[in-house]
Image (tube, rainbow, N blue to C red):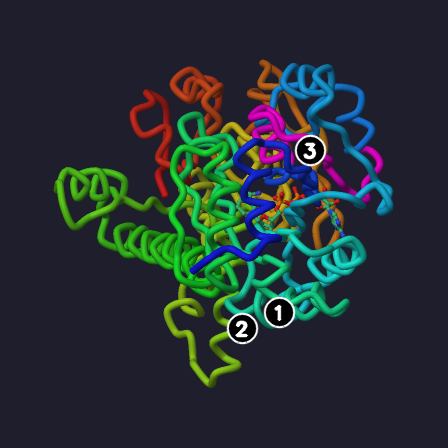
Amino acid sequence: MTLTTTAAALDVKLAQRTARIAVLGLGYVGTPLAVHLARSGFAVTGFDPQARKVDEINAGRSPVQDVAHTDVAELLGLDTLRATSRGADLAGHDVYILCVPTPLDESKQPDMKYIERAASLVAEHVRPGTLVVLESTTYPGTTDEMLVPMLAQGGLIPDEDLFVAFSPERVDPGNAKFNTGNIPKLVGGIGPRSTELATALYRAFLPSVHPVSSARVAEMAKLHENTFRAVNIGYANELAMICQALGVNVWEVVDAAATKPFGFMPFYPGPGIGGHCIPLDPHYLAWRARKEGFATRFIDLADQVNSGMPRYIVGRLMNVLNARAKALRGSHVLVLGVTYKPDVDDARESPAMDVIRELERHGAQVRYVDPYVEELPHHHGPHLQAVRAELDDETCAWTDVAVILTHHSCFDFNALSLRVPQIFDTRGAARHAPGAVELL
Ligand SMILES: NC(=O)c1ccc[n+]([C@@H]2O[C@H](COP(=O)([O-])OP(=O)(O)OC[C@H]3O[C@@H](n4cnc5c(N)ncnc54)[C@H](O)[C@@H]3O)[C@@H](O)[C@H]2O)c1
């Protein structure tokens, strides 16, 4: 395959890092990406309709926890990064990377409006030799069937003078070892030239890039990764319930099985799944599979088990209180950790909200302790009453039972187990604490 003249020109700009790059969506995915690109020498424009994020970046501050303010400030000083909310500022770029949300709508179907809006903005600016990459997680076929027709409506020929690829983001916010800069990157283009150019783009600033034969393969691989997690967590949750019925410690079971050096990978139970990816992405796959007439039984079952966990947790908590001759109604429940996973500041899409709602529905009085969350995010359903508390003597004296939902590393469960009458631990984090601890 030979590169067309326009493709060859972009290839040179990518190699020389003179290509101008626009990143659309300055969230958990787009901000680190924009910073990595700018740090490697590209001139980067970050675009986001939220003025708050744009203003923050232009003031030298990072809108996300995983990127340091100093990194943003330094790149602004070097004039390699700037942010905007003005569509007109997107003109004149060689590469557009879309990192916009892909949520579910009320009926748990893909909500494509953010990709549509971003694509129609970019469509106004594409010209011969432009590369557009979609990083948002989505169903297989989005790039070919939805993005390309929108971008090519001005007459550009896909993979001849308009290059389009899908490259899923696999970032894991809060992960100290793996980040945007060192996670292997999958790239699949709509044709060989698109794949080659998108691969060249990512190789310019990442150590490991894995091209695949099509955008669909890359789209499907991303959904496979996260559906694999959702299904296995569903099984771990079911295992926890079986272990409880059999009087076996599930945490010890999983750790014991994990000593097998091959053919086993540990997954842990918990109060449910959260975050922007694991609870959502399997629905993208299921929705697309259903359009082909497939029943996605593993996916549906995992969803059923995982989304039933908050209710199961509250049922177990009732038993824990019952053993102390207390009813949940009127009891003081201290929730420890409300983010969707440890050491992150994001409580949206956290199963803790469902647990708190269920507790309050049963008449419990709830306080929560979380160093990362000042206020509970707005969630579907009735307003949550739970108030934020400090882990002080007054709170410990108030508590009838403390439930660990998110095991932030700053929590000292050993000490805490001696300050409250009872802990119910849904994360296996207080397994070895000296006080009264009931495990999931
Ligand atoms: N957060 C993660 O851990 C993670 C990991 C891997 C993949 N993903 C996927 O990456 C995508 C982005 O996720 P995120 O976590 O960064 O979301 P986010 O909500 O943190 O950020 C998305 C940003 O896009 C902006 N936006 C909305 N409409 C826009 C438009 N038309 N043009 C430009 N910007 C627009 C929003 O204002 C927001 O700032 C999603 O598809 C998500 O599934 C997320």
Q: What element carries label 2?
A: helix
Q: From the top left corner, tell me how far across and down residue 113 is, in percent.
A: 73, 62
Circles 3 and 2, Cβ within 8 Å, touching? The answer is: no
Q: Indicate yes or no whether the magenta region holds residue 202.
A: no
Label 2 crowd (10 A; few <14 / some 14-19 / many >=20)? some
Q: Which of 382 and 201 is in front in this view?
A: 201
Label 3 crowd (10 A; few <14 / some 14-19 / many >=20)? many
Of pointers 1 and 3, the one earlier in the residue sequence:
3
Whether 117 is drawn above or below 317: the answer is below
- Look at the image and give the residue range highlighted in magenta: 31-52
Residue 321 numbered mark, or none: none
| Spatial separation of the CA atoms under disc 1 and disc 3 | 33 Å
| Spatial separation of the CA atoms under disc 3 and disc 2 | 35 Å
Amino acid carrying mark 2 in the image: Trp
- In the picture, the quarter occupied by the C terminus is top left
Q: What element carries label 1?
A: loop
The residue beneath circle 3 is 44
Q: Indicate yes or no whether the magenta region holds residue 44.
A: yes
Cβ at disc 3 under 8 Å from ligand 1: no
Whether 391 is drawn above or below 281: the answer is above
Residue lying at 54% horizontally and 73% vertically, measured from the top left: 287
Residue lying at 45% horizontally and 45% vertically, measured from the top left: 322
Label 1 crowd (10 A; few <14 / some 14-19 / many >=20)? some
Residue 287 numbered mark, or none: 2
- Please identify, in this view, whether the residue under mark 3 or under mark 2 is nearer the observer: 3
Amino acid carrying mark 1 in the image: Gln
Residue lying at 48% horizontally and 67% vertically, measured from the top left: 285
From this viewpoint, which residue is outermost toward the bottom?
293
The residue beneath circle 1 is 109
